[in-house]
Image (cartoon, rainbow, N blue to C red):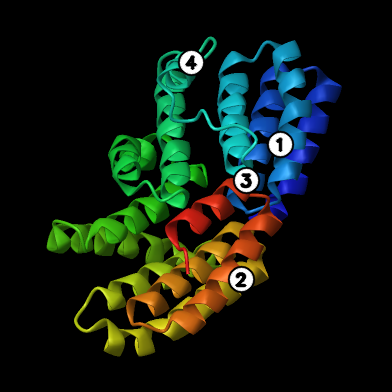
Amino acid sequence: MASCLSNLHYSYIVGRRTGNAEPVACALQFMCENEFYAGKQLSRVESDLDEYLKVMAACKQGPFYASSKLLREAVRNLKGVQENWFDDDTQHQLDSPMNAEGDNFATYKCEVSIHRLILAYFLGDYELAKECAKKSRVAEEVLKPCFSYCAQFFFDAMTSLALAPVSNKRKRIAHARKILKKLENLNTHCPDNVEHKVCLIKAELILLKGDPKKGIKKAMPLFEQACKSATNAGFLHIKALALERTSAALLRVGDEREANDFLKQAKEAYADWGAHAIVKSLDRRYSM
């Protein structure tokens, strides 16, 4: 996924040379989104967004500007420099994009829900993540050319599995399995982008089936592969998540020493990504 960034930047340069405003703004939006979904450091994503938002505003490309501003809000919340993502006032502003209507508005609304889904899941608010997952399931229709619909699949499934032990276990597991099949199909086309996601979902499914103490032996190689695959492909956030979920799995079977070690690695990985809000959230949720 990271390999496409240089091509998008070249598209931006060509658009500037030819004076074509729409391709300029489109290339910039996709470049910043792909940086985010590819797990690039949040400080870099925010810096690029700050610069490119000025270009989009100058080009009078409202829908692209609105979507990119939305992404910057998500990045800043993950970094912990602001904590207003779930406020009603902020949500009202996000629901009113500049000059976005028709298909553009539907796309924007879907992007709002996907970013809120990702934030809510990472910060441990699984009930909110569930609601955002429902709203964002139109992504397969309105965002199919974009990588964001693949991210929607993944966090939708992970949210469902996080809530499975609490309620509707069978239904949530079935939903996650349905998504897993879609991701496995995508994995045949580009393992670098998807393999780590497939491994994580499979590991979580194993732990929900039968005795966790028996399941942990089968799940651990999948957690390890998810971490390795994410690391090799440069997905810092998924590497961190794989370490976090490994810690949670070990804690479930009573191995607090190993769980604490993986949690420490997870927090270091999240810090490397720049997601200090997640580190604070982990400190609150896993006080060992």
Q: Which mark is residue 7?
A: none
Q: Secondary structure at mark 3?
A: helix
- Residue position for label 3: 36
- With 47 as the anchor, is 200 left or right in this view? left
Pinpoint residue 143: horizontal percent, then vertical percent: 44, 37
Quarter where residue 215 is shown: bottom left
Category of crowding for the residue at label 1, using alpha-carbon neighbours closer than 10 angstroms: few (below 14), some (14–19), many (at least 20) = many
Q: Nearer the viewer, mark 2 or mark 3?
A: 2
Quarter where residue 169 is shown: bottom left
Looking at the picture, which amino acid does disc 3 mark?
Phe
262 or 32: nearer the viewer: 262
Q: Nearer the viewer, mark 3 or mark 4?
A: 4
Q: Which mark is residue 46?
A: 1
- Residue position for label 2: 265
Say if 91 sits above or below 230 in the image: above
Q: Secondary structure at mark 4?
A: helix
Q: Sequence-wise, which precedes: disc 2 or disc 4?
A: 4
Q: Secondary structure at mark 1?
A: helix
Whole-Å distance between the Cαs marked 2 and 3? 21 Å
Whole-Å distance between the Cαs marked 3 and 4? 22 Å
Looking at the picture, which amino acid does disc 1 mark?
Glu
